[in-house]
Amino acid sequence: MILTGIVMALLWGCIIAYAVLGGADFGGGVWSLLASGPTAARQQRLIEHAIGPVWEANSVWLIYLVVGLLTAFPLVAYTLAVALFVPFTLALLGIVLRGAAFAFETHITGSVNLRQAWGHTFSTASTITPFLLGAGAAAVASGQIHYRNGAVQADRFTPWLMPFALVMGAVALSLCATLAAVYLTVEASHQKDHEMAEVFRLRALIAGAVTAGFGLLGLLLAPGEAPIIWHGLGHQALPVVIITMLLGLGTAFALYLRRYLLARGLVIAMTAGLLSAWGLAQMPYIVPPDLTLSNSASSPAMLGAFLGSAIVGMAFLLPSLWFLFRVFKGNQPTPAVRGRDLEES
Amino acid sequence: MSHLFSARAQMGTSLAFHIIFSVLGVGLPVLLCVAEGLALRYKDPHWMRLARQWSKAFAIVFAIGAVSGVIVEFEIALLWPSFARFIGGVAGLPFAMEGFAFFLEGIFLGLYLYGWNRLSPRAHWLCSFPLWISGGASAWFIMTANSWMNSPAGFTLKNGVITNVRPFAAIANPATPYETTHMILGCYVAVGFAVAAVYAFAWLRGQRTAYNRKGLLLGLAMASIAIPLQVVSGDPNARFLETSQPAKYAAMEGLLHSGRGQPLYILGIPDQKTGQVYLAIQIPHGESLLAHFNLNSYSKGLDQIPKADQPNAIVVHLTFDLMVFCGFFLLLAALLFWWFFLRGNRTLPDKRWLLWGLVACGPLGFLAIESGWMVTEEGRQPWVIYGIMRVSDAATPSPWVNVSFAIFSLVYVVLGATLVLLLLRLARNPLPERTWEEYFVTTPAPQAAISPDKMQEATE
């Protein structure tokens, strides 16, 4: 049971990492779509520059979440694949199109039309996908996906299209936009571009307020449409809920003071808090009301092997990530011994 | 279109698309590593230019590989939920391990692509090692999962309940050594010939530069080391299949009837309805000789397999022959090239037919991969987990699979077309030629603080 809990915590960590890293990439696409005013082109350039070529690395968290679920909780993967076939297929389409579109947009030289077409694809797909993922998560939380007598029983549309799910889709979307806008204030101020920093400060504040608004609306709908979650939020998850709300207010305050680095730390903590509150609130269920940690987990042998492989994998991954950050983020970067190459990149 | 057919068609299209990029992701880093190593060793600007040109192509290819890999992974669960549930609980581990290998490849690709001016030359070169190691490891993990589908191991099935799961025994299933070797070698063969084909084509168009010569030679060198090993590794593969998966083996060889002294059928149409093999070139006693070194040895045919458990022999036999043909064509092309090359004092042979042959090897290497993969997948039919779960029992109950098949097919067409366009543009506008010194001149560059930073910001 302890082993199951640890593995679940690991996978929940992947959800948080994907929200914090991949979510901001989606948010970048949203702001690219909403870029307006005389500085629209500059905004898009900053976004493109910030998303950079590592969306692949950011999307690994999602990949790992899927394989982890398959390996450690195969029954959950089965149930969700059957019950949420439509929204997940659509979200997959979005993930694929935005990833490919971003790669193409970055590498296309010459044809302006082609570049623009892929640019639009990128920003549209970035907007639709987090909405669908949020609605899917709400469908899981709603308790309307049943697994009984060896079969999945769920309506094909209601769980992810009812008001609660739509509101949570909006929360996911606006949260992604908030994350991206906060990160972009840091990027802009790093580049000493104070005008851009102001642009995204305002956007971060607005998006944050929208997120909070939808979040409260979700809480109002929860007692009727997601009773299990609602009960959990008021009990075992209550401290985390309160902390999350305080972190949200703190983020807004830090933005107001133009303390961008602090705001970035707070918004990441808030996102982690939000997702942790959800997880805690539906403990011990993974897919309420039928699938729990204990009745859907793989054999202990598989869980142990999975955890072991994760530890070995981390032993390779963490030093590599550290090296990546040191090279590109270190305070004293290695001097450009190959200055000429800059013309190429 | 039937429900099952749509699901199979969508999965098949996705894999056929993804496999091209996975293969490139395994093979190209080896070439990058060798080219950059040679560049540093001999202070040779041509090798350096090749490494940089290839890294640009690799950036695009890797991105599409990552995207198409996400599709495949989701589709395993979305299209085949029952299968996903079964394999996840028994043989899910290699998928999880592959996640890490892929992550590492992504990280070091970032370092490699954006680190030219941030890392010392030697450190930059060293970054190419984790690239090809994790590329190979990814292929190995995924192939163990595929091997498990062919020879499931590491669990006990009692009254439909899985017990006694042994994750590492599942990875080390009987087919693993055969499939992993054959696939990874196949990656090096296909990528080596594909790269050589590009420069052979340039050579044919009169661009007889040292740069094109080196590109051709390096690609062909990797392919030429791998292709004889690959042809040889095919033999134990087939022998293993004869006992491990007799239905697949019989279908590959077009053997409809069991018996002694079986002929070797080359091409032809093995018709399971009439029990006849039409239009084949027959080598009497050939199969018996090849399989058991005995002209009159006994081989099992498809007639020993219940009708409901037989794969489509026509598809399996013809794709098998296609793979074998491609393999031998590549082997012959490599042999002829090196023969003329060494006889001609290490100058590229000035024979148009030979160079055109090398150009043909580019697509043929990938055709061999695709057809070999068809053999193993079609040959396992009607099973998704051999002897345990049928494909028809694994498919999703959701309707609209034909709609998603249509949409994803369209996506592949658009992605493929754009990618080809981009790669062609890249090939037509290669990086400018430079001297060795020019690659390493230290110039105060104003953007230095900004442009390589692209990496970090999105990772935050």
Image (cartoon, coloured by chain):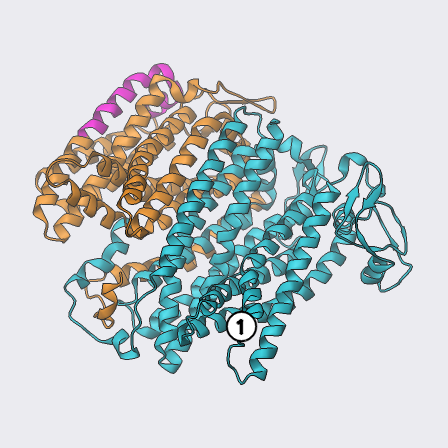
Chain colours: A orange, B cyan
Percent coordinates x, y for residue A78 in the rendering? 54, 32
With B58 as the anchor, is B286 left or right in this view? Answer: right
The C terminus of chain A sits in image quarter = bottom left
Q: Main secondary structure of the magenta part?
A: helix
Give yes or no for residue A228 being in the magenta stretch.
Answer: yes
With A18 as the anchor, is B92 left or right in this view? Answer: right
Amino acid under label 1? Ala
* x 51%, y 77%: residue: B348
Percent coordinates x, y for residue B6 in the rendering? 58, 31
Is B79 drawn above or below residue B260 in the view shown? Answer: above
**Which residue corresponds to mark 1?**
B221
Q: Residue furthest top?
A: A224
Q: Quadrant of residue B445?
A: bottom left
* x 72%, y 62%: residue: B235
* Magenta stretch in the rendered image: A209-234
- Residues B18 and A217: in front is B18
- Residues B262 and B450: in front is B262
With B26 as the anchor, is A118 left or right in this view? Answer: left
Q: How many marks?
A: 1
* x 34%, y 69%: residue: B124
Q: Residue furthest bottom?
A: B345
Percent coordinates x, y for residue B372 in the rendering? 64, 52
Give yes or no for residue A340 being in the magenta stretch.
Answer: no
Q: Quadrant of residue A135?
A: top left
Q: Residue B154, can we see it? A: no
Percent coordinates x, y for residue A136 in the rendering? 40, 28
Q: Secondary structure at mark 1?
A: helix
- Residues B200 and A285: in front is B200
Q: Residue B417, can we see it? A: yes
Badge 1: chain ID? B
Mark 1 Cα-neighbour bin, 10 Å: few <14, some 14–19, many ≥20: some
Is B360 drawn above or below residue A19 in the view shown? Answer: below
